[in-house]
Image (cartoon, rainbow, N blue to C red):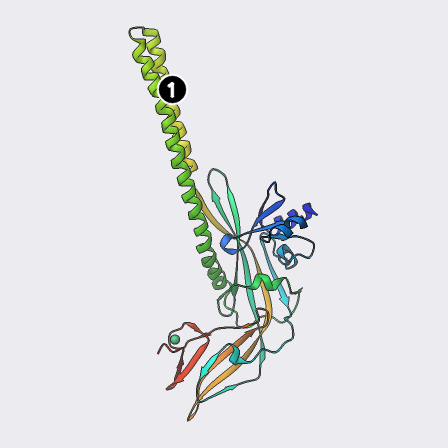
Amino acid sequence: MEEFVHDALDQAGAVWETGPDGVTSVLWESEASLRRITLEPEIAREDSGVDLVASGSPVFDSLARFGLGRGRVARAHVAPPPRSPPALGRAYQFTAEKVMRTEWRDRVEATWLFAFAATHAGEYRRESLHFCAVDAATLRVVRRLHDALSRLTPHDAGPEPEGDRPFAEVYAVARAEVLGSALTVFRAAQRQANDEAQRETSRLDAYYDAMLDEARDDLARAGADGSRHDAIAARIVAIEADRARSLSQVREQGRLAFDLEAAGALAIIYPRGVSTVTLHDKKGPRAQTTVVWDPILEQFEALVCPACGRPTYALELRGTTPSCGCA
Ligand SMILES: [Zn+2]
């Protein structure tokens, strides 16, 4: 079982390490948060911050099931639970004389889940895996897809997406999102490496200063003894050379390199519920907007305010154009 878990983690591209306490630390979610897992039910019971891994556990199952392995691009169709969207009023607030809505229809879209590997190379190489999901139709970052995946069954075939943005645009959004969090982690590592290098430099300086002081005292004591004098002078030269070598080594260790590369991508394709909402004033229909229900995330998507372009769940019709209240 242990081997199987580690294989699965490797396949999912996770970075992991098992400590003496039987807890495996796994790094693979966005913002580089560590997830801690164990095969020991006892440990999981005692520490609520540790997840128990058993077969069927959502921790790593979902990614393997969906075929997202290192270096892979996979596509999976999923069928959301057949449930009608809830009433619009639970999410949106429309202020108009009259609000009309068309019947719900399906629109198939993809949400892309990207895995990126960030590496810090320095004294030793560290790698972390970051995930980011982006809605291909709206280019919005989707935050809660991970948890939902464990409840879904992937299918090889299904209706193809319509109205998705080009892949390059979707990828760029994901990369920019991940770059931010990966760089934050990297900068923290760089700061730590700098601090360590500084501490080590001070320690080495003190060490070599003491050795040199001793050698100079010996030199003063050697007086007119020529051969003894030369031997001590050679010792001083050797100490200076050794100091320079050690200090440059420490400087090298304090320098980290950062790299971020795509490690895999998965398109999760499923129909959203779509309806057109028409806002009326006293004279009749004035403006239209499209509302979208995501049946997997179980939430309505935010609208885009036609006036300021910001996402909003409230539109008020004043004059002929609706706005979030900004106008
Ligand atoms: Zn606005």
**Extreme residue in the top direction:** 225
Residue beneath the point at 40% across and 40% down: 194
Residue type at mark 1: give it.
Ala
Number of other residues with Cα within 10 Å of mark 1, as a class: few under 14, some 14 to 19, many 20 or more: few
Left or right, 109 with reference to 305: right
Question: Secondary structure under badge 1?
Answer: helix
Corner quadrant of residue 232:
top left
* Residue 166 seen by the camera: yes
Task: Say whether mark 1 is within 8 Å of ligand 1.
Answer: no
Looking at the rendered image, the quarter that the C terminus falls into is: bottom left
Q: Position of residue 185 (x, y in %)?
A: 46, 50
* Residue 39 seen by the camera: no
Give the residue at mark 1. Answer: 238
Q: Nearer the viewer, residue 264 or 1?
A: 1
Q: Position of residue 5 (x, y in %)?
A: 66, 49
Residue beneath the point at 40% across and 36% down: 197
Looking at the rendering, the quadrant in which ligand 1 lies is bottom left
Q: Position of residue 62 (x, y in %)?
A: 63, 59
Left or right, 12 with reference to 119: right
**Extreme residue in the bottom direction:** 283
Q: Position of residue 100 (x, y in %)?
A: 51, 87
Name above or below for residue 102 compared with residue 207.
below
Number of on-image labels: 1
Q: Nearer the viewer, residue 253 or 90?
A: 90
